[in-house]
Amino acid sequence: MNQPILNLMPGDAPFRADPSDSYTLPARFYHDPEIWALERDAIFYKSWYYAGHVSQVAESGCFLTVRIHDQNIFVARTRQGDLKAFYNVCPHRGHELVSGTGKKNIITCPYHAWAFDFDGALKSARNTESVKGFDKSEFSLKEVRVEVFCGLVLVNLDPGAKPFAEQMGDLEREIREYVPTVDELQFAQRDTYDVEANWKVLIDNFLECYHCHPAHKDFVDLVDMESYRTKTCGLYSSQCAGKPRTLNARAYSFTPGDVDFGYAGWYVWPNFTIWAYPGEANLSVLQMNPTGPERCVEYQDWFVKDGKVTQQLQDAINYQIDVLQPEDISLCVSVQKGLKSSGYNQGRFVVDAGKTELSEHAVHHFQKLVADALGAKLDPEAAQ
């Protein structure tokens, strides 16, 4: 890959491996249609992608769907109890087979009623008895890699990809340390946000709390920012804080429970984040799904014990919906506008040795993952 738009261009400052000595990615990485298209093939078609929660496909015939750019996938539980994922397309004439989530006795194409079992095998195809040489086995659904990780269902379009858990190192250990009852959690609800910003703007925003004091006053009232630390670890990073500052924070009130720390959050390559709020046991995924160079849809899925949202958990969810998300979305929309300004191309990472809540080293970590995945050459010294 040697597209000039990905490499150092006139007016660009170097993007270096050392975050304390590096400028940010050039602004074109956040709005250029060519770069957005390159990300599809180099990043999204080769990475593990969050699809849903195992509790949504707990029984035979249950299914869920997920779209990765223009590729539609469905995950289903087979009659034998296995979890399978397939391209969501009928091999007859290309009609999509299922939508949303649900449960079926058999998968029947809405177009010509070809029927498939949950292992992908074609079971019946109307009026094919007289078709010369017709072989049902030639028309099984095309399978996609699928794995379950701490209850999360992940799919990968790359058949040669390393297993997700192997790629993520200590991530599972960390999640189970903060949420030991993670296996008891079930899907509760999904909240959707349509955001006029590049998907990477939202992830950059998640990865630093430098903006928290001026922009998230209720969050810094909830979380002990003195203990807030961010660590980068290969294809993920973590943001965790110690005990909550108060049990009666402005964000919401709670009593000590299964989650007795202030906050734990993880970024997972390429485009989703995992959250745990203090109080009763909970976990959520906030995923940034690109729909265009300057637009994305965010899904936040919530998982709680037995899938039942208590009043305390509802208060936490309401805080996220009514306060924190609107604050962050407003910031990101403004940043996206600024990235198109002729007065801006790059900034500098603010990094401190203590990796405190004010440090932006995790933003650099993510941006380097993007640059490396695209094969971008933005450091003249490294290119020598």
Image (tube, rainbow, N blue to C red):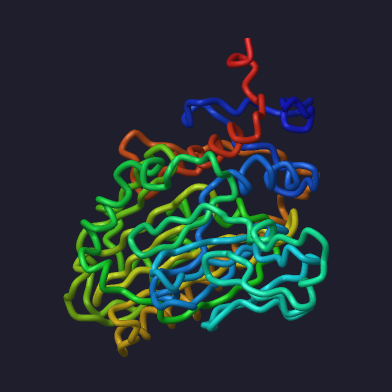
- Is 248 on the left-hand or right-hand side of 235? left
Q: Residue at x 43, y 69 (%)?
A: 53
- Is 201 on the left-hand or right-hand side of 168? right
The image shows residue 351 at horizontal and vertical percentages of: 43, 37
- Is 341 on the left-hand or right-hand side of 240? right
Q: Is residue 278 visible?
A: yes
Q: Residue at x 43, y 83 (%)?
A: 318
Quarter location, residue 88: bottom right
Q: Is residue 333 visible?
A: no
Which residue in the rendered view is the most extreme toward the top?
Answer: 384
Q: Residue at x 80, y 43 (%)?
A: 34
- Is 342 on the left-hand or right-hand side of 217? right
The image shows residue 305 at horizontal and vertical percentages of: 28, 79
Which residue in the rendered view is the most extreme toward the left?
Answer: 256
The image shows residue 249 at horizontal and vertical percentages of: 29, 77
Q: Residue at x 67, y 55 (%)?
A: 198
Work out whether residue 88 or residue 202 is closer to the camera in this orientation and state it.
88
Q: Is residue 116 above or below residue 47?
A: below
Q: Is residue 283 above or below residue 170?
A: below
- Say which quadrant the N terminus sits in: top right
Work out whether residue 113 or residue 351 is closer to the camera in this orientation and state it.
113
Q: Is residue 29 above or below residue 139?
A: above
- Say which quadrant the C terminus sits in: top right
The image shows residue 128 at horizontal and vertical percentages of: 78, 71
